[in-house]
Amino acid sequence: MNKPFSLKIFVANGDPDGLRIVERSNWIGRAVVFPRPLLPAIKQREEFNQTGVYLLLGPRPDGEGEMIYIGEGDPVRQRLESHFSNKDFWTRAVFFVAGAGQLNKAHVQFLESQLIRRAKAAKRMPLDNANTPTEPTLSEADRADMTVFLEHMLSMLPVLGVQAFELASTVPVSNASTTILTCRGKGLEARGYESTQGFVVQAGSQATLEAVPSMQEHARGAYDMWQEVIANGVLRGTAECYVFTQDYSFSSPSMAATVVLGRSANGRAEWKDARGRTLKELQMQQAEAA
């Protein structure tokens, strides 16, 4: 179960889009968030001279969404300076450090390895990393400490605008409050539900093998998403259809329905419960009840 927590955000130069230092209640770590152009002016800060793990984010080459690079540094400053000169795509960075002596090289190598594995499993954002680094050997105590450190990082990142590591939440069998919805068309059937992450399509759901020609022209973002989930293995092809290999979270019910049906679709009309009520009707009833 998720536990409530609070964040303290210090806007260091008075610009909400500039350098921000983010601390979590009852935690030794801190996050540093900044846009790329600020690096030369802020790299003298003490946080940059500490051992840490970092994320670089920026637009994909096709301009559709973001991509991410994950790395570690001891200290982070040297690595960020190198990427400032040699890596073009990124426009903003986030890195995590802790108090003096709290993190060492093996610790951040463990965090880097875990983040890369998590991003590959989530398939939410393309990785600029060419390889998955080998996880270092840690003592049982260090591994336990870094697992907690990682969990705190992962809980903070969506608040900081980074969704690359969010795995689709699985609905517990006992959770009667979650309504499973169905989208049907072209002889296919997909099942999904609304969550705080967006709209989750469940593993085993079906999707069309071919998108209508007009989708590429009139629903380019959805068409690119359709191609992406095919390329990254979320959709696996069979003779009759594509099949979802994992639970996958889309930004909206409409995006989910469009990918399933291969055409522009209003998700609030296409997703229906067992009684045939559309998502829109269910939401209207919930609003009236409230």
Image (cartoon, helix red, strand yellow):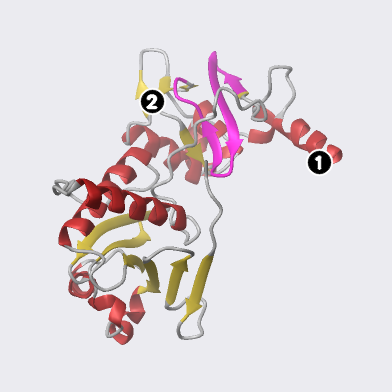
Residue 130 has which mark?
A: none
Residue type, label 1:
Ala
Q: Is residue 284 magenta?
A: no
Residue at 51% over, 30% down: 201
Q: Is residue 103 above or below residue 284?
A: below
**Residue neighbourhood size for the residue with mark 2, other residues' Cα within 10 Å, grouped as few (<14), some (14–19), many (≥20):** some
Residue 284 in picture, x, y percent from top left: 80, 37
Viewed as shown, does residue 197 lie left or right of 90? right
Task: Tell me which corner region of the image, top left, top right, bottom left or bottom right, holds residue 23.
Answer: bottom left
Q: Amino acid at mark 2?
A: Thr
Give above or below for 232 relative to 163.
above
Query: In x, y percent, where is residue 263?
Result: 54, 31
Residue under pointer 2: 245
Question: Magenta residues, as a range?
Answer: 182-204
* Dominant secondary-structure state across the stretch colored magenta: strand
Instruction: Measure the alpha-carbon separation of dots 1 and 2.
Output: 34 Å
Residue placed most toward the observer, 37 or 202 = 202
Q: Residue at x 36, y 16 (%)?
A: 238
Report if residue 199 lies within the magenta region.
Answer: yes
Q: Secondary structure at mark 1?
A: helix
Above or below 87: residue 46: below
Of residues 97 and 93, the one nearer the viewer is 97
Relative to 163, 79 lies left or right: left
Task: Label 2: state its secondary structure.
Answer: loop
Residue indicated by mark 1: 287
Quadrant position of residue 19: bottom left
The quarter of the rendered structure image containing the C terminus is top right
